[in-house]
Amino acid sequence: MKSFDVAIAGGGLIGAAIALELARAGMRVGLFDAGEPGREASWAGAGILSPAPESTAMLPLVELGQASLARYSAFAGEVEELSGQRVGFRPDGTLETFSSRHAIEELSTVVALHHGLGLRAQPLSGDDARKLEPSLSEEVEAAVLRPDEGSVDNRALTPAVLEAARRSGVEIFASSDVASVRREGARCVGLGLANEEISAQFTVIAAGAFCGSIEGVADYAPVRPAKGQMVALRSAEVNIQRVVWSENVYLVPRNDGRILAGATVEYVGFEKTPTAGGAAKLLAAAIEVIPVLADAKIEEHWAGLRPDTPDHLPILGPTDLNGLLMATGHFRSGILLAPITAQLIREWITMQRVTIDWERFSPLRFANAPQGK
Ligand SMILES: Cc1cc2nc3c(=O)[nH]c(=O)nc-3n(C[C@H](O)[C@H](O)[C@H](O)COP(=O)(O)OP(=O)(O)OC[C@H]3O[C@@H](n4cnc5c(N)ncnc54)[C@H](O)[C@@H]3O)c2cc1C
């Protein structure tokens, strides 16, 4: 029987970042992925690094997001050094634009909210915003610049983290569908694959939107898929430096010149078909905020499945089964939250305590709650 200090189910960015962190702390780690590691949500995402809350439901996540953002530069640098691969980290800020008649009032509300949360946010007039990003529409009346935010190329980052983990001693097993967690009394003693049992002192479930398919996990991680469609555009006339948000779309510049427009949020089960309606919505909103994108080439259109939870917050930490931990449910922020998730899981496994209070994200919070809302 294969035996590890830690066995991890799921080789997306979350599982890979945890594996790397634990291997760097001297642990023997096995990482098991049902398919090709890194090809689900962590491939499909936009890679925006923004702890600013998109809704009041996300307020409890701000502290964790800020802590993760603060670590990103070091994380990206370490991954590049260990893997020999670039990750497309762009700490260039993000620009949220407002075009309505009430733009100035919206701007003051957003800036006050951000300052109250300790997020740096600079209010700008429409003209000042166009000085930063000249291709913005004349309809943009105001904007807020969040200078500490940025983006990373998650399609480059995830394979680089996997490679860094491999070079640090992690054993990675592709096409290894985890079917169950193995238990002996009140202890979890590893993972069950279709034809093989894996023994481990600690077991971490990081299978993203698919956690529910692993027997013994659904009560701790009632995750459901939230489909997100994205479109990649290319235009010689548009050269945005920062992530640009409007009410209906975000635009993310990549180092290779592509501009990603995203994203829809759809609850349609596990299907990932990119649809005409999804593209139409994203393209209309993109052209509204940067009109010259009307002439851009459409290079790619895809969809991925975000791991959403009943309260839209991640599921992190130990369960009531000794040795079993959850690291999933990162919904719209898993690229941002990867470094802090890896750190907290490593702290718990090596010291049985964590430096940031994660009780709010406990897998035990769903125990008596109605599921699937
Ligand atoms: C369109 C879109 C845009 C996004 N934009 C952003 C953004 O701008 N910023 C941000 O921070 N986040 C963003 N996200 C969210 C982010 O991508 C996710 O939160 C994050 O990738 C989740 O990582 P993960 O490793 O938990 O899941 P995944 O990347 O989905 O990985 C899960 C892995 O588990 C494996 N697996 C599944 N079942 C099993 C099993 N039974 N046994 C073993 N392995 C299994 C899968 O094969 C997969 O490799 C976006 C997501 C989408 C879809």
Image (spheres, rainbow, N blue to C red):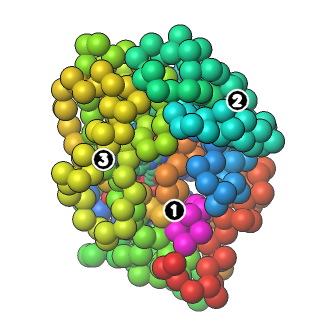
Mark 2 vs mark 1, foreground winner is: 2
Question: Of 334 and 205, which appears nearest the observer?
Answer: 334
Which class describes the residues within 10 Å of circle 1: few (<14), some (14-19), or many (20+)?
many
Q: Residue at x 73, y 29 (%)?
A: 120
**42 horizontally vs 353: left or right:** left
> Which residue sits at x=46%, y=27%?
139
- Circles 3 and 1 in contact, beta carbons < 8 Å: no
Magenta region: which residues? Answer: 309-315
Tag 3 residue: 281
Confirm if mark 2 falls within 8 A of ligand 1.
no
Residue at mark 3 to residue at mark 2: CA–CA distance: 28 Å
283 with respect to 131 (left or right):
left
* Above or below 89: residue 98: below
- Asked if residue 65 can be seen in this view, the reply is yes
Q: Quadrant of the N terminus?
A: bottom left
Residue at 56% x, 21% y is: 126
Q: Give percent across and percent down for residue 115.
A: 78, 36
Decide: few, some or many residues near mark 3? Use Cα within 10 Å; few <14, some 14-19, many ≥20: some
Question: Seen from this angle, which residue lies furthest top?
Answer: 131
* Nearer to us: label 3 or label 2: 3
The residue identified by callout 1 is 329
Residue 371, above or below 344? below
Answer with mark 2 or mark 1, whichever residue precedes in sequence: 2
Residue placed under numbered mark 2 in the picture: 121
- Answer whether residue 95 is visible to the viewer in this image: no
Residue 124 % position (x, y)? 64, 21
- The number of discs equals 3
